Amino acid sequence: MRKINNRIYLGMISGIVGFIALTILDVISSRVKISQRSFRTTGAGVWLSSRRQADKWPGQILGVMMNIGLSMVGGVSVVKLLTTFGRDKLVPKGLFFGATFGSIITTILSGLSSNKVKPKDAWSNLSYMISHFAFG
């Protein structure tokens, strides 16, 4: 296997892998009814005015695109973090980054006054945090 020397490209790939882990847990959480709405629906709510629009397939695509973009930003950030501080103790560093990055993103998405789709229950937000741990 070839080594990836470009850190931004590596971060983008890492972000997509983290996005896949986040999405798998998020889908499971939504199907089991732990979470009121998926993270992609919440992401789509930033641009759309109602949950009905966010639940339809164009809204879901919009939410996935936003989540992939944010995941890539997170991937580039974690690559920079590991480059700066070393690759030892990867699991605690990954959990720390996932929790921190996820908290910041969830706060920004829920704090926007235009977002009408934000979850207000503890289980949905707890589900998002567990998904972000998996991302890290």
Image: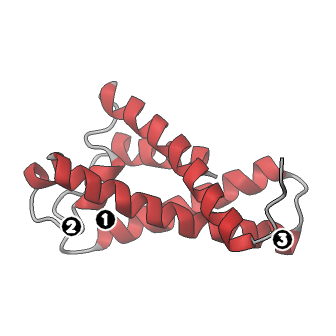
Q: Residue at horizontal 35%, vertical 43%?
A: 124
Q: Is residue 43 left or right of residue 114?
A: right
In the rendering, at what x and y percent does residue 117 appear? 19, 57
Q: Residue at horizontal 14%, vertical 46%?
A: 56
Q: Residue at horizontal 44%, vertical 47%?
A: 128
* Label 3: few (<14), some (14–19) or many (≥20) C-alpha neighbours in 10 Å: few
Tell me how far mark 2 sits from mark 1, CA to CA.
7 Å
How is the model colour-coded? secondary structure
Tell me how far mark 3 sits from mark 2, CA to CA.
35 Å
Residue type at the position of mark 2: Asn
Q: Residue at horizontal 66%, vertical 60%?
A: 97
Viewer-nearest residue: 109 or 80: 80
Residue 83 has which mark? 3
Residue 115 has which mark? 2
Q: Secondary structure at mark 1?
A: helix
Viewer-nearest residue: 123 or 135: 135
In the rendering, at what x and y percent does residue 89 appear? 87, 52
Question: Does the image show residue 119?
Answer: no
Residue 14 has which mark? none
Q: Is residue 131 above or below residue 109?
A: above
In the rendering, at what x and y percent does residue 70 appear? 47, 66
Residue type at the position of mark 3: Thr
Residue that badge 1 annotates: 110
Q: Secondary structure at mark 2?
A: loop
Query: Going from the N terminus, do you reach mark 1 or mark 3 first?
Result: 3
Residue type at the position of mark 1: Ser
In contact (CB < 8 Å): disc 2 and disc 1: yes
Q: Secondary structure at mark 3?
A: helix
Q: Is residue 36 above or below residue 112?
A: above
Q: Is residue 35 above or below residue 90?
A: above
Query: Going from the N terminus, do you reach mark 3 or mark 2 first?
Result: 3
